[in-house]
């Protein structure tokens, strides 16, 4: 045993020392001789595992170039899609309809403009500006951006067009698009207008509420003006406690703490309440939020974590998954999940400037000299590979959802260890919005990650449990999907869940009458165009199973009813059903 360990360590050291380094890979590749380009998201695999192709990619640097690109496309009947430097959206909204007559527009180099008006408390930025660059510039001016998603690997245009958010029911709320004052958008136009034009939109314009969450289907966001406030600090404390009464405390927690959230680990009966509040700039502290999941990880650790979970899946070793979950949660508690008072965590509260506390993503900044570290999910390293489901509930319905999940959990708590290996169920809060594709009422957002198999035909351990939770959310309680996340089933009948949906469609007809910015994927998700069911489509959330063939009967997975939500149809391992 000892000699085996020595050999393994030797190969691990050798592997680390010869691995080439990695900031995240560019999402667009145009190999010579292929006659086109391929777009990937940051995970390297789309929901349907199919490639996304385009005939060409253009990297504009100015608004005038955007106008020329749209004009040329309008004259030549081309399809356009915009993608940022990061391409961190899971659904295929950024993918063009036809690879042979479509062009990708990357905003990677359209990122030089950040103009701050201190007296008006606003900042105007080019669409390709990274969230981190924006925050740093704003903080340097003694101001703060109130809302931001927890992950900073997004662009200004991307963060508002997909409805990205943090957590808050206070003020204007936690969604970034609700802090938008103005949007400049480049859209197709008539020939006598030069085939393209810039729309300058604000709250006085009826198209503004469509543009605030546009999903890239209306035109090209050129510039965004966001509201700011005087600079402030935040004070954060994590309270690990029993999950008893969670269904009755979530609302009071959101009302009591401006940026509060809750992380729920169902298998451990544990809820972690984040006490997160604004404090004056004079408050002592120079803390940082360097969230553990977004830190640069040793490649060897990411690979070994994935390899371990893969083995546990193959062996159907649920106890092994529970041991992993326990160790990860213990470690997160020990290091405050990445909060640092200075260089390390030394105790609560952790107090720091808003710009250092509101978002994180240190793994983005690995360099070509860093031969051993990268983001844990980097598709080149065979590291973490997972689904991300995010459901947005009207606050009044969330209590019953929690109770249903607890009923399902109590049948066998170990069934939830798989989700607790990642981040459990992250519960956040966003306010009612005027955006047509935003939330019409104060809402609760639940986000959870879980293992995805290497192959789309491979079933997963306890996959029926996650499918039942997913269907509880979107079917029983009518939750809305986060536009930048989720598997395909989450978007079922989504057009019926938004009071402003008809307003959005009307705006699209006016701004993009020839559907230049549409694709088969956006039409399918937005307008309910049903795809074709196929054998195994239930395994990856491409369909809700209705027949055994939608699961994997040869591997013992059959389409069954839910255990608590009886109307659910899930792929459950039933070895006794094999004949």
Image: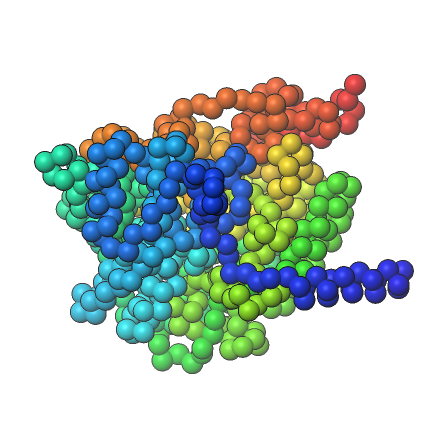
Q: Residue at x 64, y 40 (%)?
A: 453
Quarter the C terminus occupies: top right
Percent position (x, y) of residue 367?
51, 66
Q: Is residue 279 left or right of residue 51?
A: left
Q: Residue at x 36, y 55 (%)?
A: 108
Regarding residue 178, the answer to whether it shows in the image is: no
Furthest residue in direction front, as rendered:
33
Regarding residue 419, the answer to whether it shows in the image is: yes
**Up/down of 314 relative to 362, above or below:** above
Q: In this view, does 2 lie to the left or right of 55?
A: right
Q: Quadrant of residue 499?
A: top left
Percent position (x, y) of residue 388?
53, 44
Percent position (x, y) of residue 513?
22, 30
Foreground of the two, 398 or 42:
42
Q: Which residue is drawn at 47% across and 71% down?
A: 288
Percent position (x, y) of residue 419?
62, 47
């Amino acid at each position: 045993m000892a000699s085996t360990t020595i050999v393994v360590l030797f190969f691990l050291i050798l592997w680390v020392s010869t691995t080439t380094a990695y900031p995240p890979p560019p999402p667009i590749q145009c190999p010579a001789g292929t006659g086109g380009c391929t777009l990937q998201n940051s995970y390297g695999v789309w929901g349907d595992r199919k490639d996304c192709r385009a005939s060409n990619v253009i990297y504009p640097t100015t608004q005038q170039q955007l106008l020329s690109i749209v004009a040329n496309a309008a004259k030549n009947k081309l399809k356009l899609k915009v993608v940022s430097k990061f391409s961190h959206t899971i659904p295929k909204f950024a993918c063009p309809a036809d690879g042979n007559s479509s062009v990708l527009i990357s905003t990677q180099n359209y990122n030089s403009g950040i103009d701050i008006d201190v007296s008006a408390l606003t900042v105007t930025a080019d669409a390709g500006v990274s969230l981190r660059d924006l925050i740093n510039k704003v903080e340097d001016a003694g101001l703060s951006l109130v809302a931001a998603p927890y992950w900073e690997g997004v662009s200004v245009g991307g963060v508002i067009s997909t409805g990205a958010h943090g957590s808050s029911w206070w003020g204007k709320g936690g969604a970034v698009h609700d802090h938008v004052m103005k949007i400049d958008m480049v859209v197709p136009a008539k020939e006598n207008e030069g085939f393209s034009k810039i729309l300058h939109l604000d709250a006085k314009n009826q198209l503004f509420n469509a543009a605030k969450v546009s999903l890239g289907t209306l035109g090209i966001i050129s510039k965004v003006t966001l509201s700011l406030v005087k600079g402030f600090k935040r004070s954060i404390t994590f309270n690990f406690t029993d999950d008893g009464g969670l269904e009755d405390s979530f609302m009071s927690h959101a009302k009591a703490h401006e940026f509060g959230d809750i992380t729920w680990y169902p298998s451990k009966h544990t809820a972690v309440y984040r006490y997160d509040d604004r404090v004056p700039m004079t408050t002592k502290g120079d803390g940082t939020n360097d969230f553990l999941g977004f830190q640069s990880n040793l490649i060897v650790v990411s690979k070994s974590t994935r390899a371990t979970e893969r083995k546990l899946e193959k062996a159907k070793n649920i106890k092994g998954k529970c041991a992993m979950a326990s160790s990860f949660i213990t470690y997160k508690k020990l290091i405050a999940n990445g909060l640092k008072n200075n260089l390390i965590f030394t105790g609560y509260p952790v107090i720091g400037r808003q710009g250092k506390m509101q978002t994180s993503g240190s793994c983005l900044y690995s360099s070509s000299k860093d031969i051993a570290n990268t983001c844990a999910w980097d598709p080149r390293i065979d590291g973490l590979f997972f689904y991300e489901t995010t459901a947005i509930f009207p606050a009044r319905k969330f209590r019953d959802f929690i109770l249903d999940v607890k009923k399902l959990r109590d049948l066998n708590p170990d069934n939830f260890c798989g989700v607790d290996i990642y981040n459990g169920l992250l519960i956040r809060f966003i306010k009612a919005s005027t955006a047509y594709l935003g939330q019409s009422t104060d809402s609760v957002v639940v986000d959870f990650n879980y293992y995805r198999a290497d192959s789309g035909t491979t079933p997963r351990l306890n996959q029926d449990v996650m499918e039942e939770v997913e269907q509880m959310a979107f079917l029983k309680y009518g939750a809305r999907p986060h536009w930048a996340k989720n598997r395909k089933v989450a978007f079922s009948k989504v057009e019926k869940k938004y009071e402003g949906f008809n307003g959005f469609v009307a705006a699209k007809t006016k701004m993009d009458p020839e559907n230049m910015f549409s694709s088969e994927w956006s039409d399918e998700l937005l307008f309910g165009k049903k795809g074709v069911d196929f054998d195994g489509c239930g395994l990856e959330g491409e369909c809700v199973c209705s027949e055994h063939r939608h699961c994997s009967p040869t591997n013992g997975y059959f389409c069954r009813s839910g255990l608590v939500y009886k109307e659910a149809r899930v792929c459950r391992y039933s070895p006794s059903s094999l004949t």
